[in-house]
Image (cartoon, rainbow, N blue to C red):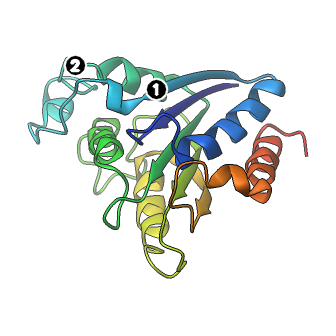
Amino acid sequence: MKIVALFGSPRKDGNSIAVAESFLCRARQLGAEIERVYLNDLHFRGCQACDGCKTLTEICVLHDDLAPVLDAVFAADLLVLASPVYYGDVSAQLKAFIDRTYAFLVPGYIAADHPSRFPRRKPLVFILTQGHRDPEWFADILPRYRDLFYWTGFAETYPLRIVDVYHRGDVAKRPEVTAEAEHLAERLLGKS
């Protein structure tokens, strides 16, 4: 299984990446091939609303650092998205990637029976970490993006949402988080 993991945090030692690494390390132990992408290290623009991916070609027409990432996501068997919650949403880095997945939709996608260019639906692991300790805050993020991801062509979104992890390293103090991430890897790779 080929897994592509996109990290939306600007901190390589951030909590969202720590959760993702727990999942990825277990997946690698179970035989998965892993590709990691730190979005903050790339130079790319958000969607330009040019519709070139609908009228000129079947891929995004922007030639920047995100182009090979979009190709890797298209070819992957499973996608992992990991982000801290910033101002009530995913990070700007991850949001810009999500906007560029517009290229995965076919022309006339709104009325299409199968709006995605993916040949088959694939699972998506969606990791969110937030400093705010009230789980009611920002609870709308997961359902909002889950519907969007399904429309884009992902079979199911498997969420890992961790609240009350404000400081760097807070996830490391929560062994149940690591266990949950590892269990999800086992479930998705058929080993549980």
The residue positioned 19% from the left and 35% from the top of the image is: 54
Specify the amino acid type for callout 1.
Val
Compared to residue 144, the image places residue 47 above or below, namely above
Q: Is residue 92 left or right of residue 120?
A: left
- Image spot of residue 27 (x, y percent): 75, 32
Residue lying furthest right in this view? 192
Specify the amino acid type for callout 2.
Asp
Q: Is residue 103 left or right of residue 130?
A: left
Give the structural element (helix, strand or loop) at label 2: loop
The residue positioned 70% from the left and 40% from the top of the image is: 23
| Badge number at residue 64 | 2
Q: Using the rendered view, name the quadrant where residue 32 is placed.
A: top right
Q: Using the rendered view, name the quadrant where residue 29 is placed.
A: top right
Q: Nearer the viewer, residue 81 or 14?
A: 14
Q: Nearer the viewer, mark 2 or mark 1?
A: 1
In this figure, which residue is indicated by the disc labeled 1? 37
> Which numbered disc, 2 or 1, marks the residue that appears first in the sequence?
1
